[in-house]
Image (cartoon, rainbow, N blue to C red):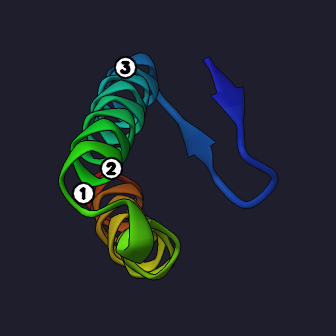
Amino acid sequence: MGSDGLIELDESCWSALAKYNLVLATVFALLLLVVRQVEPGQAQLLLVVENGVLALVFGGIQTYCWISR
């Protein structure tokens, strides 16, 4: 299907990465809306932490897709 520059990934890996990317973006947006409604003063700090955690989760999923190929 294509290459990420390191290894060739098949269609199922790209499909899994696309689905998890969609979930990641959706979770990030929903949490942003909740934080802005509940605690507007803490939104900046929580968003920085949230971004780091979600990046680690997505990185782990992406690595798993590469390894399980």
Callout 1 touching callout 2 (CB < 8 Å): yes
- Snapshot quadrant of residue 30: top left
Residue drawn 46% across the image and 82% down it? 45
Query: How many neighbours does mark 2 have within 10 angstroms: few (below 14), some (14-19), or many (20 or more)?
Result: few
What residue does disc 3 label? 15
Q: Amino acid at mark 1?
A: Ser
Q: Between marks 2 and 3, how big is the CA–CA gap?
A: 13 Å
Q: Is residue 49 left or right of residue 16?
A: right
Q: Amino acid at mark 2?
A: Arg
Q: Amino acid at mark 3?
A: Ser
Callout 3 touching callout 1 (CB < 8 Å): no
Residue drawn 38% across the image and 60% down it? 40
Percent of width and height locating residue 68: 24, 57
Q: Earlier in the sequence, mark 2 or mark 3?
A: 3
Callout 2 touching callout 3 (CB < 8 Å): no
Residue drawn 52% across the image and 72% down it? 44
Q: Nearer the viewer, residue 31 or 39?
A: 39
Q: Quadrant of the N terminus?
A: top right
What residue does disc 2 label? 69
**Element at badge 2?**
loop
Q: Earlier in the sequence, mark 3 or mark 1?
A: 3
What residue does disc 1 label? 68
- 19 in relation to 29, above or below: above
Q: Nearer the viewer, residue 40 or 15?
A: 40
Percent of width and height locating residue 48: 51, 77
**Element at badge 3?**
helix
Q: Nearer the viewer, residue 67 or 33?
A: 33
